[in-house]
DNA sequence: CGTGACTTAAAAGTCATACTTAATCGCCGT
DNA sequence: ACGGCGATTAAGTATGACTTTTAAGTCACG
């Protein structure tokens, strides 16, 4: 029996998860375990484990005598990294990207303000390094190298905030930035204004100027929103 | 075989989840399925399903020949509502409450600003109703009634923002507010200043004044932070 | 003495099957 | 028309046999 993933349940999950989040099964649709058993040619055990996981993500609900019903979008655990990844890979990627960018615009400025208070000298150094890295790679089609620094920069900010909820958004930001680079203005170099803002945020944090760090990060966020044509107040 | 919950796997989950998030099993500890089988007196099937769910929450990782190892805190899906509930019920409730309050302070002002743009007339009405409800119940030990309006108010703001990520934080805010009422200043009536701020937020949203709605909500958040002695910039 | 290839065994993963439980549907009687 | 009651269906649970991965121990060889 050949296997490709890290377990059969994972394989089933990687098939059902994207399908559900993509809306292939509209809310209210019913899946039956024995049907899935046949479709994936695996045992009951495997299907049930996959279902349990989908259930914990609130993508589906399992009820006796009726089957596994797909839940409406409002029920989904949209903060589950797995769900985020599936949705970003699927059809409503644009919508998802907007949602996440708005979330970023709320969180990152506050995180930067906290980082200005709490960042260790090492973190300040990392921040500066990556900001300078962004400058160095901001011209001449080095978008991938630029992206690495950009992601790292925002990750450090979020981690330095000392708030675990913020820190855990690092992956989300990484996905958003990656998505942006690879699916939008692939050809043009990054906006020089944005690059400068990053350098100045690093400065502000180093100088423990929370208000300035926050304000500057808010400008970066505004830029990101503008790129996606999101209404900016 | 007697059952109390909605399924045996749920019962196991409700026992293991809180234990792990409370730090009863330090990171790196190993659980073996057959040991758990005996401990809970259930079949492998049930244990495995519970493990799969814990795994999807990144509380544990299962590896062959070694067992189910508890992951360090940084790995946990701290946005999973279930995980949040477990942690709020456990030992590091205070820490968790702080993290969540900081998150609120970042998100809610932005949500309020968006709500000012997007709230429907019905939502504006709900907002006003609940704000007035807060006023009406703000004096004379009617804390439970007050709490209901407070929660509803913040829920409407988050939903009106038109951002699904924000909307899904409604439950979190509800937990935080409930926790605050039931575990802190249970005896004193709510701060009149906070009550007034809610009324004014409702006004600002109704008048489509995004900047004012955001600023006022920021004041509410600052108050919540102050209650928990969180450094305010 | 070290190192690399080989063996072993422990624990998770999978499967098949039998059985239990709960809830929906429809029949039947009032 | 309606309400209860049994039949039926699909999920839930239990169990035992078997497979796969892999840490760890062993042994021979350099």
Image (tube, coloured by chain):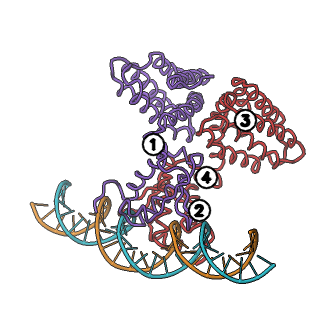
Chain colours: A red, B purple, C orange, D cyan
**Which residue shows up at 66% across the image and 43% down it?**
A170
**Which residue shows up at 57% across the image and 60% down it?**
A19
In the rendered structure, the residue with mark 1 lies on which chain? B
Residue bearing the label numbered 3: A226
Judge if badges 1 and 3 mark residues of a common chain.
Answer: no
- Marks 4,2: beta carbons within 8 A: no
> Which of the 4 image quarters holds residue A12?
bottom right
Residue that protrudes farthest toward the right in the picture: A140
Distance between mark 1 and mark 3 Cα atoms: 36 Å
Percent x, y for residue B206? 52, 23
Q: Check the picture and name the quadrant holding the N terminus of chain A.
A: bottom right
Residue bearing the label numbered 4: A87
Find numbered disc 2 in the image and state the secondary structure of the residue it sits on. Answer: helix
Of discs 4 and 3, which sits in the foreground? 4
Does the rendering let one see residue A39? no
Residue bearing the label numbered 1: B85
> Which of the 4 image quarters holds residue B209?
top right
Q: Nearer the viewer, residue B35 or C22?
A: B35
As drawn, the label of residue A14 is 2
Percent x, y for residue B168? 51, 41
Find numbered disc 4 in the image and state the secondary structure of the residue it sits on. Answer: helix
């Amino acid at each position: 029996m050949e296997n490709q993933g890290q377990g059969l349940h994972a394989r089933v999950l990687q098939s059902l998860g994207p399908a559900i989040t993509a809306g292939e099964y509209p809310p209210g649709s019913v899946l039956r375990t024995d049907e899935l058993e046949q479709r994936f040619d695996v045992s009951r055990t495997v299907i049930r484990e996959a279902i349990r996981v989908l259930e914990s993500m609130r993508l589906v609900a399992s009820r006796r005598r009726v089957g596994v019903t797909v839940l409406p979008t409002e029920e989904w655990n949209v903060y589950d990294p797995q769900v985020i990844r599936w949705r970003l890979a699927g059809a409503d990627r644009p919508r998802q990207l907007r949602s996440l960018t708005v979330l970023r615009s709320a969180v990152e400025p506050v995180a930067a303000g906290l980082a200005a208070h709490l960042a260790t000298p090492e973190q300040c150094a990392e921040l500066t390094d990556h900001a300078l890295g962004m400058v160095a790679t901001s011209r001449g089609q080095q978008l991938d190298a630029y992206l690495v620094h950009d992601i790292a920069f925002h990750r450090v900010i979020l981690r330095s905030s000392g708030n675990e909820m913020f820190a855990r958004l690092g992956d989300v930001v990484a996905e958003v930035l990656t998505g942006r680079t690879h699916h939008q203005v692939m050809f043009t170099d990054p906006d020089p204004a944005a690059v400068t803002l990053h350098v100045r945020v690093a400065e502000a944090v180093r100088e423990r100027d929370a208000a300035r760090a926050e304000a500057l990060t808010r400008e970066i966020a505004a830029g990101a929103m503008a790129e996606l044509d999101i209404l900016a107040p």
